[in-house]
Image (cartoon, rainbow, N blue to C red):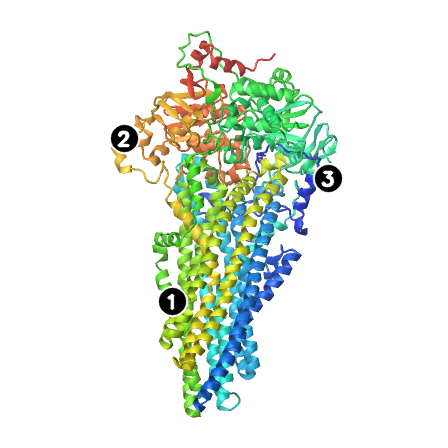
Amino acid sequence: MSINEKGVPSRAETVQGSTADSKDMDDQIQHILNSEGKELGGMLVGAHEKKESKEEEEEEKPKGFKGFFKKPKKVKEQKPQIGYFQLFRFATTLDKMMILFGVVGSAGTGVSMPLMTVFFSDIMGSFISYNSLVIEGSKAEADDLLNSEVKKTVKIFGILAAALYVVSYATYLCWNATAAKQAKRMREAYYRAIMSQEIEWFDSVNTGDLTTRMSSDISLIQEGINEKSGFIIQYLTTFFGGFVLAFIRGWKMALVVLAVMPLLIVSAGLMGANIGKLTNMVQEAYAEAGAVATEVLSSMRTVMSFNAQEREIERYSDKLSKGHKVGMKKTMIFALGVGVIFFFIYALYSLGFWYGAKLIRDGEASPSKVLNVFFALMIGGFSLSGAAPSISAIASARGAAPDVFKVIDKKSKIDATDLVNGDSADGIKGEIEFRNSTFKYPTRPKIKVLDNVSLKVKPGQKVAFVGESGCGKSTTIALIQRLYDCLEGSVLIDGKDIREYNVRSLRQNMGLVSQEPVLFGVSIAQNIKWGAKDYENNPPTQADVEEACKGANIHDFIMTLPQKYETLVGERGALLSGGQKQRIAIARALIRNPKILLLDEATSALDTESERLVQDALDKSTVNRTTITIAHRLSTIKDSDMIYVFGKGKIIEGGTHAELVEMDGAYASLVKAQALKKVNGDQAEKKVDTKKEKELTRKMTDAKGKVGEVSASSVDSEDNDEDKKIGTYGDFIWVLKKYSQQTKIFIPAAIVSFLDGGLFPSFSIVFAKMLTAFGNTDMAEQKRETNMYSLLFLAFAVVNYITIGTRMYLFGRGAVKMSVRLKHDMFTQFIKQDSEYFDQKVNGSGALTSRLASEPDDVYKLSSDGLTVLFNAAGSLTAGIIIAFVRSWMLTLVILAVVPIIAFAQSQQHKTMMGGVKQSKSAEEMIAQEASESITNIRVVTSLSRENTFILNYTRNTIIPHKTTIRGFYINGLFYAFSTASLYLVYGLAFFAGAKFVMAEHITTEQMFNAIYAVVFAAVALGQTSGALGMLPKALNSSHKLRKLFGTEPKISIFDELREKSKSILPSELKGDVKAENVTFSYPTRLDVRALKRVNVNADAGQTIALVGSSGSGKSTIINLILRLYDVLEGSISVDSVDVRDWPLDKLRDHPSLVSQEPVLFDCSASENIKYGKPDATEFEVQQAAKAANIHNLLMDLPDGYNTRVGGKGSMLSGGQKQRIAIARALIRNPKILLLDEATSALDTESEKVVQYALDNASVGRTTISVAHRLSTVQNADWIYVFKSGEVIEQGNHESLIGLGGTYASLVKQQSLAIN
């Protein structure tokens, strides 16, 4: 990300702040902010990166579409290594005590296995004694001895099982509950840290990256500190416990075996370090992909309009491919590492076996002691195989932590969440002074946006700033709000430098309505209430809300909605028209009753009638209040006490409207440029269709998507039914089948895993042979046999190295491929949906990005780490049971009889986990959506002083899913503990039944031991599946959601057009005729409200037509229907006499070019944004389009010229500059049909004049449909349609409509600039 680029003013997309004198709420907020005793704040102090030379940039830049979004290389900073114990930094004292108990419990569980070998040895001795007594003829005595010894052993196993049940339950609870609590605190701290940062930092980071990390990286850290840590301790304790026991039983043999240990430890250390490093690289690549996804999914209408779906998929895939390459490398290293570790373990057995046999020959140890030592070592060694997934999880957690902790630890330079430092601004009068203020945007330090500006605004004065786009007007508002600090000079309020005020208190006393008002995805009422000064302690009443709405001329419209004030407005207010949004934003400012009112093009999106009413309301509200207004429409500011004209960061003129007109300077020329043509009493054409209906239908139409919330629609009820379903194995198998190309490698992997698992119980046969070999009295024969078995072990080490390495690599490779493909296909599936899909609340960009990050990861973890363990365990179990059946079918049947009980316990655990996962996942997606929305729209949050409100909301919203998760651990722990403890009950049952069968002479002692050993080996392998089984619920739930997603087909899709079928009916060459015939339309989320009612609009080829009328009257809806973002309910829209529904969608959208009211730019260079309209455009074409849009000179003045980065959503440009780049993007396509939806509303008069001239020229030979409130831009149109309440009430040309003396004529009069 190039930070050293030269700057253009950043848009403060902000709305008002809110004050709170109140102690209680402030104290509560402060408590949350300072919780866990950590100061969590601030980030990015300077963000000045070194700019690379053009040569390097060009060299680095790939060709084609991918190259568009290539940012200049930056020097990679060395990331700090996070130690394992640092992962627990959010643990409280209670958590640490619980973790300590978890450590002890895990160690206790781990040591139980070596301890069991002691009891095994004792009971083996009892059976050997029994055999001896039977041979001596003392059968009765032998039976009594065996009976008493077996009973004693069974009791011990029962006590062990009970102890293990309690310890396992507590351990499971301690690890998982503390991990969930820490992850909750970590997410809150991360979110809190982000929300406290200064705007300068947000200019230099990608907000999509932040939200992705919040979802995926913290989940990875949680995985590393939950029961996986417990498993590591458990398996290591078993391993070292085996060694300790071996030392006690035979220290010489154990000491020799230890010689291999350093190799084992070095191998494990190297593998862990590499896995952590590679995990970090994978997460970084996926975070970049997540940032692309956030940007695209929040700008879908722009993407659809420019037919850019396939290009965006390519861009997303490009980011994914980096993660794919590193993921494959990580898989290879992990597989090799684990294979090497097990090679050394078996080599260790080989050495131990050989040396043990030597000790027997030398008379230094008995065969039983050597066997005991060997068995202890083997149990310990094999326990490590279960640790592999846990090692991977901890390494991944360490890899993900640096980026998360870096944000949390940053200190903000301007912290609006601070409630303590600085003076209160509550008593201010509203005097504002700029004293020699000079400012440059930190991301572009070479351009002075304000150059030594000095001005003074008296309390209660109405002041206006005018001037060309990018001349510094909006920057003054950003500085007054202290979004940035001056580089030189100062800004004073009531004679005091604003840096001395508490930031939150300062902003609470200001109200802002910005050029591009952003609403949050909540109800209309809630959006307005958030504007209140003291929302937390003194929230406004419904009457206050309605009063503010009446003042903003929006109340009547709201009352026509079925849900009225409780209507949801959609993400960024997407379900409302531009004018409706702006009026709600004005109501939000009015409800605050601020000392200082800042209006940045506050009425630019309003129709003339609304503007007049709202302007009256604003004029009344400005009495005794300092007001600064920025406006291009001079009619809105002509009554100001003082007007300052800005030019290139300086004040070039100042005075009242009359004084400035008289001066005949820059301001006077702006006034002349906005004059409307007079009419010489020409005869008007007659009015068409003047049905007067109640304002009931002034519904949510216009700009971006419209309509209120998803009420009790069919969509909702379907979703509710779906929410009750939980994932099944069938869903997971469906995913595997769908990606059979990637997962076919799982077949050999499963076979190798199964065979590898079978090797373990096969040891019971080798064990029996070893007994015979050790007991051989012929020393030469003993040496020969034991040497052979030692070599067999070494061969087994090689085989195991191959099988383990192979199975882990194959599963890992297939899982990485499937995960990357799954992310790609999910993104494709999202992006191919139609507008109706994105209008639904559950499909906000934050929720969808969260799904992109988590669902493929859940499936990946089970496929990569879980399946290999499960198939391995299945192989062990199968081999164990077969061997046991061959040795003693009677004993095996007895043991198998209890398997259903254990299976039931595990199924119950699985079932409760599934329910918990389903609930918490849905809640987490909604929380992620809200967090994403607040981070993406941080400027609005900042201006409203709502940082603490959102932090509190986030904290509160996480409480219920957190409680659900913790409750789930309490229940799951019961079943988990039973599964763990039941193994010892099985051993007790096996010895008890075995003794009875031996005494009854049904089986021999040797048969019984063979059967029990086989079952024990199988049980050990089965015990290692608990980690893998824990992955199942998340994977199955995600598989279910994926299956549902891939079954969702859009009604309007660009990917499945009948291209061949349509060829015959398409015109050979497009002319550009557009016709709407009897069109009736309702937005899918509000079918009961008509947006258009039997509307007829006709634009002949090459004709320019204009659509004017009040906000929400249906003008922008016509444009949405021409682009087929929606389908009409009745009537038809046709292009060149072909119904748009019969056009292949890609062909249809190739012809028109759209410039919308709130243009969306992408986080790349200006050149790349212009090329978005035509990917194969040459630099010459880009510059020609920029010249036509009057942006060329400004871009050339920047150090990086056309390669200057514009920031996310164009945040580093002013509104006018963004709109001109959007116009250039439209013109570069050289379209046959030009759709202008308030295309020049954000432009200053001079730019508008130049751009309008360019658009007028561009309109020659092409059809132009223009939506406008500023009538000077459409007065030359061939035909003008006047809309009201979804109907056309007047039509004609400018002169004829004025002659009618109707609605249009009234609008013209209201826009007059005559001096009173």
Label 3 is placed on what type of residue? Gly
Above or below — where is 543 with respect to 206? above
Question: Where does the C terminus fall, quadrant-wise?
Answer: top right
Q: Nearer the viewer, mark 1 or mark 2?
A: 1
x and y percentages locating residue 484 in the rendered image: 64, 38
Residue linked to disc 2: 1068
For mark 1, what is the residue?
Answer: 754
The front one of 747 and 1177 is: 747
Q: Residues within 10 Å of mark 2 (few under 14, many from 20)?
A: few
Quadrant in the picture for residue 532: top right
The answer to whether residue 128 is above or below residue 885 is below
SS label for mark 3:
loop
Residue 807: image quadrant is bottom left
Asked if 102 appears above or below 298 in the picture, the reply is: below
> Percent position (x, y) of residue 311?
40, 42
Could you say which is closer to the camera, residue 692 or residue 212? 692
- First-in-chain label (2 vs 3): 3
Contact flag, marks 2 and 3 (Cβ < 8 Å): no
Cα–Cα span, label 2 and label 3: 70 Å
Q: Which residue is denoted by mark 3 in the rendering? A: 422
The amino acid marked with disc number 1 is Phe
Left or right of 527 on screen, residue 1295 = left
In this image, 250 relative to 306: left or right? right
* CA distance for labels 3 and 1: 68 Å
Is disc 1 in contact with disc 2, using a CB cutoff of under 8 Å? no
Whole-Å distance between the Cαs marked 1 and 2? 63 Å
Q: Secondary structure at mark 2?
A: loop
Q: Is residue 897 left or right of residue 606?
A: left
